[in-house]
């Protein structure tokens, strides 16, 4: 079993739709959590950090449930430019040592 | 752009050969991590260097080795290449103690034949 599990998709949604991605992680020692976005044949880019209190950045909302070891990302009012692979990431490092564990990613395709 | 550069962008090698990939960190960043991303998978952590010392390693064999230089540029060396080493190799830099955000370079795409 992988340490970070995601639904691979693809999620095919029309513009304006709301889409939710889920992710589970198995190591309770994980310290911090992120969503990264990766466009085709490009490097991953940080989308947002994820906190237990939930956090929002424009159309994006991320949530962490430590008890269930579950992370979510909600995208509202989808745009064509949101088409990408979304990577769920946990950091198992502490202090100066960062060990990012990536899920395999969920593909999103937004169509007109 | 992240300010992290990698070279070369693409590389073709044959089984058994050795390869060196290079990364130039964002200015002032003293920590660099390397990742391997196979097709259809998320990046996998290879190792991290902080101030020229390896201070963390993932589940990769010793034929994967690295160096970090005083100017914080770094190298990833892979000996005795195997077909399964074909992947996108990413480096990511950050400034230790200034948050966890890592800045990824564009990667080197390695094909082993």
Image (cartoon, coloured by chain):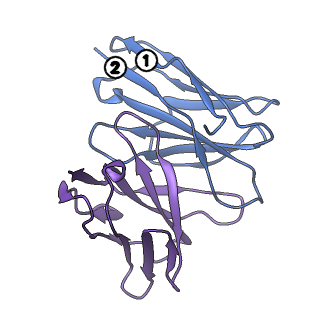
- In this rendering, the count of numbered labels is 2
Residue B72: name its quadrant.
top right
Residue B2: name its quadrant.
top right
Residue A16: name its quadrant.
bottom left
**Left or right of residue B22, residue B89 in this image:** left
The first of marks 1 and 2 along the sequence is 1
Along the line of sight, which residue is nearer the eye, A111 or B61? A111
Residue at point 43%, 79% (across, down): A63
**Left or right of residue B39, residue A37 in this image:** right
- The colour of chain A is purple
The chain containing the residue under callout 2 comes to: B
Residue at point 39%, 22% (across, down): B110
Along the line of sight, which residue is nearer the eye, B91 or A58? A58
Above or below, comparing residue B53 to residue A27 in the picture: above
In the picture of the structure, the residue carrying the numbered disc 1 is B10
**Left or right of residue A3, residue B95 in this image:** right
Mark 1 and mark 2: Cα distance apart in space: 8 Å
Question: Circle 1: is it few (<14), some (14-19), or many (20+) Cα within 10 Å?
Answer: few
Quarter occupied by the N terminus of chain A = bottom left
Whole-percent x, y for residue A8 in the image: 22, 56
Task: Assign a secondary structure to mark 1.
Answer: strand
> Which chain can be seen in blue?
B
Do labels 1 and 2 touch, CB within 8 Å? yes
Whole-percent x, y for residue A48 in the image: 52, 63
Task: Assign a secondary structure to mark 2.
Answer: strand
In the picture of the structure, the residue carrying the numbered disc 2 is B111
Whole-percent x, y for residue A74 in the image: 35, 72
Above or below, comparing residue B61 to residue B14 in the picture: below
């Amino acid at each position: 079993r992988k340490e970070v599990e995601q639904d691979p998709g693809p999620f095919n949604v029309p513009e304006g739709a709301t889409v939710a991605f889920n992710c589970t992680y198995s190591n309770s020692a994980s310290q911090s959590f992120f969503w990264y976005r990766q466009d085709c044949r490009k490097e991953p880019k940080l989308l947002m950090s994820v906190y237990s209190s939930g956090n929002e950045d424009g159309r994006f909302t991320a949530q962490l449930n430590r008890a269930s070891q579950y992370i979510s990302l909600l995208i509202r009012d989808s745009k064509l430019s949101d088409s990408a692979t979304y990577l769920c990431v946990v950091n198992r490092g502490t202090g100066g040592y960062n060990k990012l564990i990536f899920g395999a990613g969920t593909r999103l395709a937004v169509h007109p | 752009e992240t300010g992290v550069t990698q070279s070369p962008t693409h590389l073709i090698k044959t089984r058994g050969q050795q390869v060196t990939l290079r990364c130039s960190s964002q200015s002032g960043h003293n920590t660099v991590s390397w990742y391997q991303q196979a097709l259809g998978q998320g990046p996998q952590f290879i190792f991290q260097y902080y101030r020229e010392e390896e201070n963390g390693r993932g589940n990769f064999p010793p034929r994967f080795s690295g160096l970090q230089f005083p100017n914080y540029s770094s190298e990833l060396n892979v000996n005795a290449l195997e077909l399964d080493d074909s992947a996108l190799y990413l480096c990511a830099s950050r400034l230790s103690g200034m948050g966890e955000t890592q800045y990824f370079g564009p990667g080197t795409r390695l094909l082993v034949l």
